[in-house]
Image: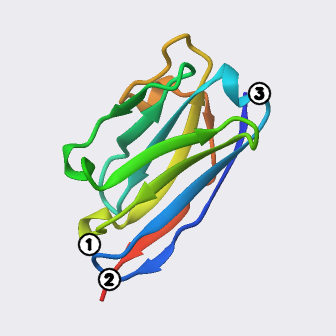
Amino acid sequence: QLQLVESGGGLVQPGGSLRLSCAASGTLADYSIGWFRQAPGKEREAVYCLTKSGTTVNYADSVKGRFTISGDIAKQTVFLQMNSLKSEDSAIYYCAAARRRFGCTANARLFPSWGQGTQVTVSS
């Protein structure tokens, strides 16, 4: 498994921005990286994914045009830039890794490696 650590969460007002980081201890280029989020009382949902070839995959229509996923292979880090944040974006955000050739999927069960999560709270 790939070891992952999320960071960058915090408290932000509606309309604000945050950039989440997912740092990997391993060869990031061998994995697809997905961002998931889970709000209290709700199921974990897929948000965005970055394939090993650099293709981005969106799984949540609600974040289209506001969130962007990107990666820095040299730094072994994947980012989730979140703009125009809404209260509905409040959740614990997790990154996950899969070694599959095309590892991006909305099914969290298919990701073997997970970080500990970082809290994002959008409130005025």
Q: Residue furthest bottom?
A: 124
Which quadrant of the structure image shows residue 59? top left
* Residue at 56% over, 37% down: 96
Separation (CA) of disc 1 from disc 3? 35 Å
Does residue 105 appear to the left or right of 102 in the view shown?
A: left
User: Quick one: label 1, few (<14), some, or many (20+) residues within 10 Å?
Assistant: some
User: How far from the left and from the top, in percent, is residue 99?
Assistant: 62, 18
Identify residue type, mark 2.
Answer: Ser
Q: Secondary structure at mark 2?
A: loop
Tell me the mark number nearer the camera, choosing from 2 and 3.
3
Residue 123 is at least partly visible in this image: yes
Q: Which residue is mark 2?
A: 123
The quadrant the C terminus occupies is: bottom left
Q: Which residue is mark 1?
A: 87
Q: Report if the CB atoms under discs 1 and 2 are less than 8 Å apart.
A: yes
Q: Earlier in the sequence, mark 1 or mark 2?
A: 1
Say which of 41 and 112 sits in front.
112
Residue 117 is at least partly visible in this image: no
User: Quick one: label 3, few (<14), some, or many (20+) residues within 10 Å?
Assistant: few
Identify residue type, mark 1.
Answer: Ser
Up/down of 105 relative to 67, above or below:
above
Q: Earlier in the sequence, mark 1 or mark 3?
A: 3
User: How far from the left and from the top, in percent, is residue 18?
Assistant: 47, 67
Q: Secondary structure at mark 3?
A: loop
Q: Which residue is mark 3?
A: 27
Separation (CA) of disc 2 from disc 3? 37 Å
Up/down of 26 relative to 78, above or below:
above
Q: Residue furthest right?
A: 26
Does residue 50 appear to the left or right of 26 in the view shown?
A: left
Q: Secondary structure at mark 1?
A: helix
Q: Earlier in the sequence, mark 2 or mark 3?
A: 3
State the colouring used for the structure image.
rainbow
